[in-house]
Amino acid sequence: MEKLTLTVNGLAREVNVDPNMPLLWVLRDLLGLTGTKFGCGVAQCGACTVHVNGEALRSCVTKVSRAVGQQIITIEALSENNDHPLQLAWAELDVPQCGYCQSGQLMSAAVLLREKPNPTDQDIDDAMSGNICRCGTYPRIRAAIHKAAKMQQEGVKP
């Protein structure tokens, strides 16, 4: 066990853990940030996606020691009031069905829109291909990403 300091959602947080513990379990079990979900445990489904220094990473296979000194953002801090354009578009277009994968979907989509403010269908498909939705809401996810891109272009700030 080691005492590690993580910067999560803008706050310094100390944890006493095995440095090889997956970041996912530190976030969920020790810090109580349960918006990030466990899906497959092998970085294939995307439910555990968080941002580390602005990059979308699978927290289920990221050792907590890798996150020390990095800026970690979870779904809880995507926006202060759930008013990120993606969150607004997701709600307006009724994207979630069961909802389990949605935090990972949103976190991956946020990186996409930051890197490509006006993505094509192919850009969306490529960026979101690592996120699995068992309910099959892919057409609504794509439509919501396009809507959020338009909202951002119209001045809705993430």
Image: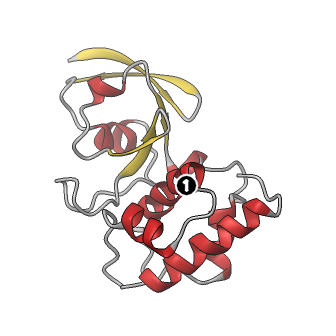
Left/right placement of residue 49 relative to residue 145 reads: left
Give the vertical position of 55 relative to 113 (above or below). above
Residue that appears at 51% across and 56% down: 112
Q: Which of 24 and 110 is in front in this view?
A: 110
Give the vertical position of 79 relative to 149 (above or below). above
Give the vertical position of 121 relative to 66 (above or below). below
Toward which corner of the image does residue 82 lie, by quadrant? bottom right
Residue that appears at 33% across and 67% down: 129
Toward which corner of the image does residue 77 lie, by quadrant? top right
Counting from the top left corner in percent of width and height, residue 9 is at 56, 35
Dot 1 lies on which element?
A: helix
Residue bearing the label numbered 1: 110
Residue that appears at 63% across and 65% down: 87
Counting from the top left corner in percent of width and height, residue 125 is at 40, 71
Left/right placement of residue 139 relative to residue 27 reads: right
Q: Quadrant of the N terminus?
A: top left
Left/right placement of residue 31 relative to residue 89 reads: left
Type of amino acid under label 1: Ala
Residue that appears at 30% across and 62% down: 130
